């Protein structure tokens, strides 16, 4: 038997690593991947609490999070392609002007 | 005992993959370590008795979304990222901040660990109803409206992605 708190601690660690990747990374694609990592960490919390309360609603929420993440990835990567076409760079520090 | 060993092994793989995502400088290496994180998270979902979520995690996340990421990395021919002044400031201020935040969360969770209880393998299996069956019942009865709304959301997202990624001349 594994304490539920271990799962929550693992989720917190993954979320923190996602935040730090979001802060440290300068490549726009890697920043986007760290958002996916944070979503995964939250999903782990959802599933752990679904197990704790013996309710499947938590797993349905995970399903919705995954659907929204898939939609978000499609739109986000399209935006990244558009930014790369306009700026010829993926470094967020060089994407600092609203107009070209 | 076996449950704890499996949890520690897959949790360690998860954290190692996430650390590798931060440490690697080439986006393709970060993407592949994110696949490792998602795969071992799917196994942790199995330990929690969420078979459907584990399968969807592998198919949708490790399959579809990460293929999209790798495709874009290769399409844009992304090289190793360059470190700038901004990233040094982020490491100096963000690193301790994130460490403090994680410490507070971990301390709070571990202090109230007794109230949470434990997780047993197979504890989610209800009498005569498997995991996927139960989720389908919820999804198509209680959550029918959100389910339909997400389908509209995906349709809008697909059209938005096509419009955003299209070349300006062809629009």
Image: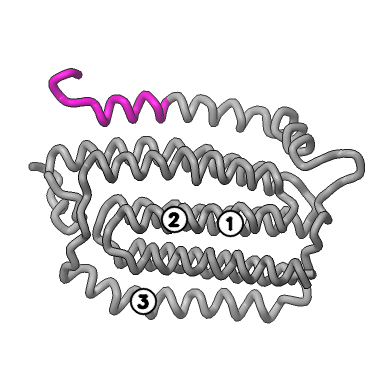
Q: In the structure shown, which secondary structural element does the residue marked by tag 3 occupy?
A: helix
Q: Position of residue B148 (x, y in %)?
A: 59, 26
Query: Is B95 inside the magenta-drawn segment?
Result: no
Could you say which disc has been placed on residue B34 in the image?
2
Q: Work out whether residue B114 or residue B53 is closer to the camera in this orientation and state it.
A: B53
Main secondary structure along the magenta-highlighted residues:
helix
Residue that carries the numbered disc 3 in the rendered image: B95
Mark 1 surroundings within 10 Å by alpha-carbon count, few (fewer than 14), some (14 through 19), many (20 or more): many
Mark 2 surroundings within 10 Å by alpha-carbon count, few (fewer than 14), some (14 through 19), many (20 or more): many
- In the displayed structure, does residue B16 sit left or right of residue A84? right
Q: In the structure shown, which secondary structural element does the residue marked by tag 1 occupy?
A: helix
Q: Quadrant of the C terminus of chain B?
A: top left
Q: Quadrant of the N terminus of chain B?
A: bottom right
Q: Work out whether residue B83 or residue B96 is closer to the camera in this orientation and state it.
A: B83
Q: Position of residue A13 (x, y in %)?
A: 52, 70
Q: Are marks 1 and 3 in contact (CB under 8 Å)?
A: no
Measured in 3D between alpha carbons, the distance from the residue under mark 1 to the one under mark 2, in whole angstroms, is 10 Å
Snapshot quadrant of residue A85: top left
Query: Is B168 inside the magenta-drawn segment?
Result: yes
Mark 3 surroundings within 10 Å by alpha-carbon count, few (fewer than 14), some (14 through 19), many (20 or more): some
Residue that carries the numbered disc 1 in the rendered image: B41
> Residue at image x 50%, y 46%?
B62
Above or below residue A8? Residue A82 is above
Query: Closer to the N terminus: mark 1 or mark 2?
Result: 2
> Which stretch appears magenta?
B156-171
Measured in 3D between alpha carbons, the distance from the residue under mark 3 to the one under mark 2, in whole angstroms, is 20 Å
- In the displayed structure, does residue B156 sit left or right of residue A80? right
């Amino acid at each position: 038997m594994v304490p539920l708190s271990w799962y929550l601690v693992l989720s917190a660690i993954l979320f923190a690593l996602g935040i730090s990747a979001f802060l440290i990374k300068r490549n726009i694609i890697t920043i986007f991947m760290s958002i996916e990592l944070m979503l995964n960490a939250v999903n782990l919390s959802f599933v752990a609490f679904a197990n704790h309360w013996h309710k499947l609603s938590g797993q349905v929420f995970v399903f919705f999070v995954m659907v929204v993440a898939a939609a978000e990835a499609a739109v986000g990567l399209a935006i990244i392609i558009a930014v790369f076409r306009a700026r010829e760079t993926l470094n967020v520090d060089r994407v600092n002007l609203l107009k070209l | 005992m076996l449950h704890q060993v499996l949890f520690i092994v897959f949790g360690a793989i998860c954290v190692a993959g996430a650390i590798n995502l931060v440490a690697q400088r080439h986006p393709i290496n970060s993407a592949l370590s994110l696949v490792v994180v998602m795969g071992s998270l799917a196994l942790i979902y199995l330990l929690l008795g969420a078979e459907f979520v584990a399968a969807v995690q592998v198919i949708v996340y490790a399959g579809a979304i990460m293929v999209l990421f790798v495709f874009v990395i290769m399409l844009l021919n992304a090289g190793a990222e360059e470190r700038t002044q901004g990233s040094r400031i982020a490491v100096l201020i963000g690193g301790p901040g994130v460490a403090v935040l994680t410490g507070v969360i971990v301390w709070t969770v571990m202090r109230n660990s007794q109230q949470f209880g434990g997780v047993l393998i197979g504890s989610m299996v209800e009498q005569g109803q498997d995991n996927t069956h139960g989720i389908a019942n919820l999804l198509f009865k209680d959550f029918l409206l959100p389910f339909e709304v997400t389908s509209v959301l995906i349709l809008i997202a697909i059209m938005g992605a096509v419009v955003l990624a299209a070349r300006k001349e062809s629009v």
